[in-house]
Image: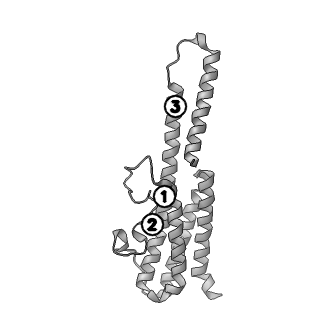
């Protein structure tokens, strides 16, 4: 059972228990509208599910943006393949892991049809589909390209870190791990090369 499913179940159970206790103690207060507590619990569960789905979409978007930067840098500077390809593979795995639980999102009409699926999307390693063919601009100098990749890795890491407090516990652990990996990528792309 997913975290969202457990939350919805807990919210519904707590609401039902509160409704049962209220019904036992205030019967002479007048007739209670049937299903009010259940409707409130369902609305809250839907609100929580939508918020979590939006958080997951943002996390996947940040990871896919980084992945697109890796793809563009590799396309512009094939000589960097040995250094950048392992980091790119790691970023692709992160994007996939962050999007895994989002296949059936409650807000499918959000305008980001690809961001909620667990598939790697246009940046999966086959340029020429979606936004990967246009790709972000890459500096002609390989060192400058590496610096830009490091900045993109830091930006993705910061984006994941910013979502930690709002994320459910299991997803927060995944976000923290991916954020730490992004910081390590930034180090390896810049400082690590000097060591």
Give how far apart the Cα atoms at labels 1 and 2 are.
14 Å
- Among the two numbered marks 2 and 3 on one chain, the one whose residue lies closer to the N terminus: 3
Q: Position of residue 152 (x, y in %)?
A: 51, 72
Name the residue at 58% across, 58% down.
Answer: 162
Of labels 3 and 1, earlier in sequence is: 3
Point 62% across, 82% down: residue: 191
Residue matched to label 2: 120
* Rendered location of residue 138, percent (x, y): 42, 80
Q: Tell me how far mark 3 sits from mark 1, CA to CA.
A: 27 Å
User: 187 above or below 51?
Assistant: below
Q: Residue furthest bottom?
A: 79
Q: Residue 144 placed where, x, y %?
A: 49, 84
Position of residue 60 measured from the top left corner of the image (x, y, whole percent): 49, 61
Q: Residues within 10 Å of mark 2 (few under 14, many from 20)?
A: many
Q: Residue at x 59, y 66 (%)?
A: 178
Residue 110 visible, this angle: yes
* Residue nearest the observer in this picture, 104 or 183: 104
Camera-side residue: 188 or 45?
45
Residue that sits furthest to the top in the current view = 28
Establish if 10 lies above or below 115: above
Residue 40: assigned label: 3
Q: Which residue is mark 1?
A: 58
- Image depth: mark 2 or mark 3 in front: 2
- Residue 150 position (above or below residue 14): below
Mark 1, secondary structure of its residue: helix
Q: Secondary structure at mark 2?
A: loop
User: Is 166 left or right of 66, judged from the image as shown?
Assistant: right
Asked if marks 2 and 3 touch (Cβ < 8 Å), the reply is no
């Amino acid at each position: 059972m997913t975290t969202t499913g457990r939350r919805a179940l807990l919210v519904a159970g707590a609401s039902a228990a509160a409704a049962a206790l209220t019904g036992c103690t205030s019967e002479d207060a007048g007739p209670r509208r049937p299903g009010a507590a259940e409707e409130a619990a369902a609305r809250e569960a839907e609100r929580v599910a939508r918020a979590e789905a939006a958080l997951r979409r943002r996390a996947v978007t940040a990871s896919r943006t980084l992945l697109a930067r890796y793809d563009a840098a590799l396309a512009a500077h094939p000589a960097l393949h040995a250094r950048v390809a392992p980091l790119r593979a790691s970023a692709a795995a992160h994007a996939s892991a962050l999007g895994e639980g989002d296949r059936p999102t409650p807000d499918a009409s959000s305008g980001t049809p690809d961001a909620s699926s667990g598939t790697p999307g246009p940046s999966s390693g086959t340029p020429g589909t979606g936004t990967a063919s246009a790709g972000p601009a890459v500096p002609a100098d390989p060192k400058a390209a590496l610096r830009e990749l490091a900045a993109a890795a830091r930006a993705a890491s910061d984006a994941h870190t910013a979502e930690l407090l709002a994320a459910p516990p299991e997803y927060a652990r995944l976000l923290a791990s991916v954020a730490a990996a992004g910081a390590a990528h930034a180090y390896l792309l810049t400082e690590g090369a000097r060591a």
